[in-house]
Every structure is written in C-alpha cells, then in structure tokens.
Amino acid sequence: MYIAITGSSGLIGSELRRRLEAAGHTVLPVLRGDPGSPSATWSPAASWFRPGALEGVDAVVHLAGESIGSGRWSETRRRELLGSRTETTRLLVSQFASLARPPALVSASAIGYYGNRGDELLDETAARGEGFLAGLTEAWENEAAGAGASGTPVTLLRFGIVLSRKGGALPRMLLPFRLGAGGRLGNGRQWMSWVTLDDAVSAITHVLEKRQAGVYNVASPAPVTNRDFTSTLARVLHRPAILPMPAFALRLLLGPSANELLLSSQRVVPARLRASGFQFEHAHLEPALRAVLDRPGT
C-alpha cells in the first residue's frame, strides 16, 4: 500500500513509518513547512496543502496534534490544543474531494472522549463524557468523520496512555521512582487505560490491512488503577512507591488540567479491536513494563 502519515516524526508516527516500510509498504510523510519550501507538504498555519500531494495514496494515517500534557491549560493553550487537531484535520479532509480515488482515513483520537467515569467499564458504545478533553476529542472526531462525504472510509482510534521509553508519559514517571520518590496520584483509585507503543502501532497496521472502519479503543484489555500502576512500576524498577502526591498538590502544580490528565478515571476496554481479531502482544501491565523497560522478571 501507499500510505501517507501526518505526525510522522512523533512517537507513534516514527515507529509506524519504520514498521510499514519494513513490511514493504511505501510511506509518504506529510511534512509541515513554509508553502515556498520544496520539501513541504502542508502548512496548517497558512491553510495550505500542496496540490496533488495525496494523489494515488491508498490510506492516510492522521497523527498530527500538539501534546496535551505540556504546559498549563490557559485559555490560549486550550485554543492551541483544539486548533492543532480540528484545523489540521479539516485542512487534510478538504483535500479528499479533489482526488480521483479518495484514500481511507485512519485518524487518531483519545480516550479523553469518555471523561471522568469512575469504575464504569467503557467500550466504544459509551457516550461522550464531560470536560475539556471530551469536547476536544469529539470536535476532532467530527472533523475526521467529514471525510466520509467524499466516500472515504473513516477509522477513529481512541488511544490510551502509550507506554514507551522513547517519549510520552512513561519517561516523565521514571525519574521520581528511580529517586525513590514515586507513589500514587491522589487517592490512586482512578483507572488508567494504557497500551504499549508496539501494540498501538500494531493496531494501526491491523485496521489498515483489514480495512476496518468506525471507532476503536486502542488500550490494553486489562486497565489498572493508578495505585496498581504505580506499585507495579515500582516493583519493576526495584524501587519503593511510598510518597503519594495529594490531589491538591497536583492542582497547585498544574492547575485545572490535573483533574483531567492525572486524576480522571477511565476504565476503557478494546471491545471492537478484539472482536476484529486483533491480538495484544502486551495485554497485562507488569510484563508490558518489563518489555518496554527491558527488565526481565526476577
């Protein structure tokens, strides 16, 4: 297949590109840049897309979007986070109508769609929750779904917390634990839905190869509470997990974003992905962390 990838230099995008090329597919990185640059494919800031850049592409994997976890959520930052998803997706989708054969679209989303749901088990049929992230992901998905008007099959992948040594949340967790200062966040009862980078990329290649459309949760079938996650990480690192971070301290450090990023509870299961025949390489947390961190069991 001939596959275009936005966000091809990011955590998921770079590994996806490597995996697709190793499997014999041709990858087109959709590169940002000034409209005058010969290497640039698009410039979302200038609402510009190189004419004909997607001609002949079989599928587009859309992973572009600014990091949710960086910086406090001021009103300006919220607009940036929303725009980096909705405006880029709108610009990308606008190209499909002019193509002789519109490609399939596989677009990233996030389990933030479900909001803070306590112990409720959340599959793809669960309704949208409340909060900034829920509204952001709904708007993001709506822009991607607009590609369907051009006859494009649309797949929406709601990613959980992606575990990798190369980036994302896990490297930021490691330092306090290695210093012996790790511990649960808040009361530790909030559910964390996670997936290894390898499984996240395998899920993308799975839906591409199977031509699966619709919404899919990309998260391990075995979510854990924050208390269990932190104790497991401590065990894998051979460090204690005895210094919890109270919720009020997190709110002082991060502002309102702490509630949704660190204290929100999402017990997500990948019902549709498993029903489609997908097999997780890392379904359970401790062996997953050992594989990611290259730490065999003792």
Image (cartoon, rainbow, N blue to C red):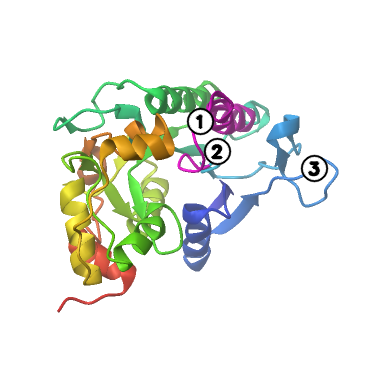
Q: Which mark is residue 168?
A: none
Q: Which mark is residue 152?
A: 1
Q: Between residue 63 and residue 106, name the one nearer to us.
A: 63
Quadrant in which residue 282 is drawn:
bottom left
Local secondary structure at mark 1: loop
Horizontal relation, residue 146 to residue 212: left or right: right
Local secondary structure at mark 2: loop
Picture coordinates of residue 163, whole percent (x, y): 35, 56
Q: Is residue 296 visible?
A: yes
| Whole-number angstrom distance, CA of label 3 to CA of label 2 | 25 Å
Magenta region, main secondary structure: helix
Q: Is residue 222 visible?
A: no
Q: Given the image, on which type of amino acid does mark 3 rest?
A: Asp
Binning the other alpha carbons within 10 Å of mark 3 as few (below 14), some (14 to 19) or many (20 upward) gives: some
Q: Given the image, on which type of amino acid does mark 2 rest?
A: Pro
The residue that disc 3 covers is 34
